Amino acid sequence: MQGKSIEYNDNRLALYCAQQGKCAITGQPLVIGDIHYHHKTRRADGGDDKYSNLVLINQDVHILLHAVHAETISYYLQKFSLNSRQKDKLNRPRKRLNLTLSNHKDFVVLKKI
Ligand SMILES: [Zn+2]
C-alpha cells in the first residue's frame, strides 16, 4: 500500500493469517478491497503500526466502530444484526475511543472523536 509504512504492510499479512481471514468483530470472511485496519490506539494518540496495535475488520464494521451519529449507528446495526458477543467485540474498541454501548437501542454517544 502506497504511503504506508513497511511495517504496516508486513503486519497486514500476519494479521490476516492470525485472524484466519475473518473480521475480528463479525467473524465474516474478509474480502479483498473491503478490508480495513483499525488502530487500537489511534495514531493521533500515539498509536503505531505495530502488529499489536492493529486489527483487521470489514469496511462497514469500521464505519460502525467509529460512528457517532445515531442514524449511522442504527443503519449499520440493522445491517449486521450483531449478536451480543459481536456487540461486545465492537464495544471494546469503542470504549477505548470513549464511544460506549448503551441505550438508543444499542449505542449512546458519549464523546465525539
Ligand atoms: Zn479505526
Image (cartoon, helix red, strand yellow):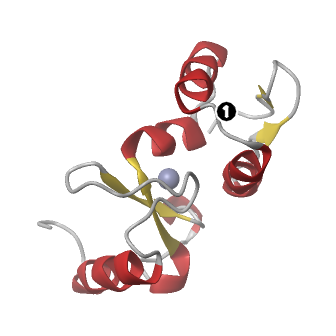
Picture layout, residue 50 above or below residue 106: below
Give the residue at x 20% y 51%: 33
Where residue 42 appears, x then y in whole percent? 54, 61
Residue occupied by mark 1: 112
The kind of residue on which mark 1 rests is Lys
Q: How packed is label 1: few (under 14 Cα within 10 Å), some, or many (20 or more)?
A: few
> In the picture provided, is 109 more to the left or to the right than 68?
right
> In the picture provided, is 105 more to the left or to the right than 49?
right
Picture layout, residue 7 above or below residue 43: below
Give the residue at x 73% y 45%: 87
Q: Assign the N terminus to one quadrant of the image.
A: bottom left
Find the residue positioned furthest to the right.
103
Where residue 5 appears, x then y in whole percent? 24, 78
Give the residue at x 41% y 49%: 58
Observer-nearest of 68 and 83:
83
Picture layout, residue 10 above or below residue 62: below
Where residue 52 appears, x then y in whole percent? 54, 83
Find the residue positioned furthest to the left.
2
| Element type at mark 1 | loop
Q: Assign the C terminus to one quadrant of the image.
A: top right
Give the residue at x 16% y 66%: 3
